[in-house]
Image: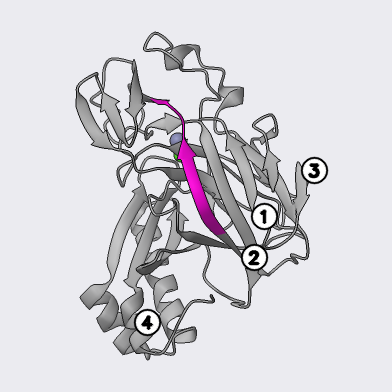
Amino acid sequence: MTTISRDNLFFAFSASISPAARVNQGDLVTLETHDCFEGQLQTKDDLITNLNWDHVNPATGPVYIEGVQPGDVLRIELVEVEVGPQSSMVAIPGEGALGSLITEMETTILKREGDVLIFKDKIRVPKKPMIGVIGVAPAEGSVANGTPGPHGGNMDCTLIGQGNRVYFTAGVEGALFGAGDLHAAMGDGEIVVCGAETPGQVRFRPQVVQMAGLPTPFVETPDLVAVIFSAESVDAAAQGAIERMADFLTRFVSIPLNDAGMLMSLVGQLKFCQVVDPLKTVRFEFPKNVLQQYGFEMPA
Ligand code: CA
Ligand code: ZN
């Protein structure tokens, strides 16, 4: 098994970054990740005013996956997502969906007791690990890790966790995959621009699947599939996610458009990933049991 340590950090998805490791499809690979502040916030006295912004949103990698060609659909199976013993959260005046109301800068540290996170030493919430930043290099140029897009990046989607699968379209040979910005828990929307920010590790298995043209980024859980889309407004992000799910249902599952629309209206779920970054991220979820009734299964 290949393990890539958190010394191998990068801050933008780009074809020009040399790979930290080369792995084969089907290999089990472990990425050790830093939190989104690269460990700069360890106590409540570590305020974001003193943050070195050159060390924000690191991802571990990139990983060159042998045999991946541009245009291939790459499936990342998230075998295990583990988070650290403590995580940090911040409230920042002027930032996030409540920024106009928040007047006091604050950092808080959440300790973890097993599967429970302790907020302000008394409020217990369940751990629900997820990956904030995950993606592949775009075909051209470079995308800072803080930005989501067609290549993945900072999508902050709560479905991207252990036991689920994420699909990307490779932009370059080898895909140059990486991930970071783990959250021990996060609510949909990411209201104050953070989840429980934590270091951790991601164990995954990469595999090219024969689903050319799949609208990516795409997520599969045991129960549902979801299309993720990011745009400058929540409206545009929602419209993009909706149209791409309709595209998936008509082209891959062969459901006529009107039926796809009615089923999306009947059992589909439009949800926010995050509404706080310059590009907002929305997903559209659709239940697998309906796909199965049409005789469709995702690749094994
Ligand atoms: Ca994030
Ligand atoms: Zn984060």
Residue 176 position, x and y percent, is 71, 51
Range drawn in magenta: 77-87
Instruction: Tell me whether circle 2 and circle 3 mark residues in contact (CB < 8 Å).
Output: no
Q: Earlier in the sequence, mark 3 or mark 1?
A: 3
Q: Earlier in the sequence, mark 1 or mark 2?
A: 1
Q: Secondary structure at mark 4?
A: helix
Instruction: Tell me whether circle 3 and circle 1 mark residues in contact (CB < 8 Å).
Output: no
**Distance from label 1 to label 2 (Cα)?**
18 Å
| Residue 92 visible in rendering | no
Numbered label attached to residue 138:
1
- Report the label total: 4
Mark 1 and ligand 1: say if the CB distance to the nearest ligand atom is below 8 Å. Answer: no
Name the dominant secondary structure of the magenta segment: strand
Q: Amino acid at mark 3?
A: Ser
Residue 208 position, x and y percent, is 66, 69
**Distance from label 1 to label 4 (Cα)?**
30 Å
User: Is 118 situated left or right of 159 in this image?
Assistant: left
Mark 4: few, some, or many residues within 10 Å (few <14, many ≥20)?
some
Using the rendered view, name the quadrant where residue 202 is placed: top right
Q: Secondary structure at mark 2?
A: strand
Q: Amino acid at mark 2?
A: Gln
Residue ID for mark 2: 207
Mark 2: few, some, or many residues within 10 Å (few <14, many ≥20)?
many
* Magenta-colored stretch includes residue 84: yes
Residue ID for mark 3: 18
Q: Secondary structure at mark 3?
A: loop
Q: Earlier in the sequence, mark 1 or mark 4?
A: 1
Vertical order, 254 against 291 (above or below) = below
Mark 4 and ligand 1: say if the CB distance to the nearest ligand atom is below 8 Å. Answer: no
